[in-house]
Amino acid sequence: MKKKFIISLCITLVISCLSVVIIPKNQVVSAQEAKTVSFDESKVLETRFLNMLNHNFVYNDAFFTVEDIVNCSMPALLELRDTEDDSFIAQNYVSDYVYDMYGIEDIDYAVINTQFEQKTDFVYIIPRGFTVFKHTILSVTENEDGSFTVKTKVIADAHDSEEITDICTSLIVPNENSRFGYNIISSVIDFEEFSI
């Protein structure tokens, strides 16, 4: 009997110790303070746009044709190359990326890279060097139509030349169905001696 009483007393003590939580006085937060979350929405947008632009390889006249957009997008997708033949990327990866970044749907792959080797449901990666772009946000301006004009300082590091720095102006529009929530519909770099 005495043994049962001691065990029951021990269990009661352990439970009561576990159920008491002591909050140090300097860590007590009122309900009102806990509900107040401050963040700068413009910084959130800047971060999102910067992420998109640093993954973008489509600039200037490359926005004029879907074929150019597809081919310029390939450097962003190289990790998704076909394991059996790394000269190709599956069309579904290309379609998803091009839609999320640029809002283009229903790509007619029958007219893409017709002069190169073809493989069903894949896109051929044209062998060439490419340029890596690193952006820094200078300004984000919301336009009257809900689009955004984003000015960035961009450093272009080409595979065969020195780095070049200039200003890039991009037009970005909302798209709730995009993984990013937005699409880039133009991005212009005014490099005088630079060909993309």
Image (tube, helix red, strand yellow):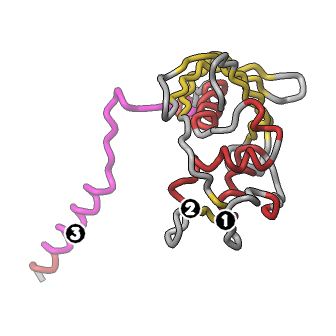
Q: How far apart are marks 2 and 3 (CA)?
A: 68 Å
Picture residue at 12% right of the left edge, 83% below the top? 1
The label nearer to you, 1 versus 2, is 1
Report if residue 29 lies within the magenta region: yes
Q: Is residue 109 left or right of residue 157?
A: right
Classify 125 as above or below 147. below
CB contact under 8 Å: marks 1 and 2: yes
Name the element at disc 2.
loop
Which numbered circle lies on residue 117? 1
Counting from the top left corner in percent of width and height, residue 50 is at 60, 31
The label nearer to you, 2 versus 3, is 2
Q: Provide the residue designation for mark 3.
A: 11
Q: Distance between the residues labelled 1 and 2?
A: 9 Å
Mark closest to the chain's N terminus, 1 or 2: 2
Picture residue at 10% right of the left edge, 78% below the top? 2
Report if residue 54 lies within the magenta region: no
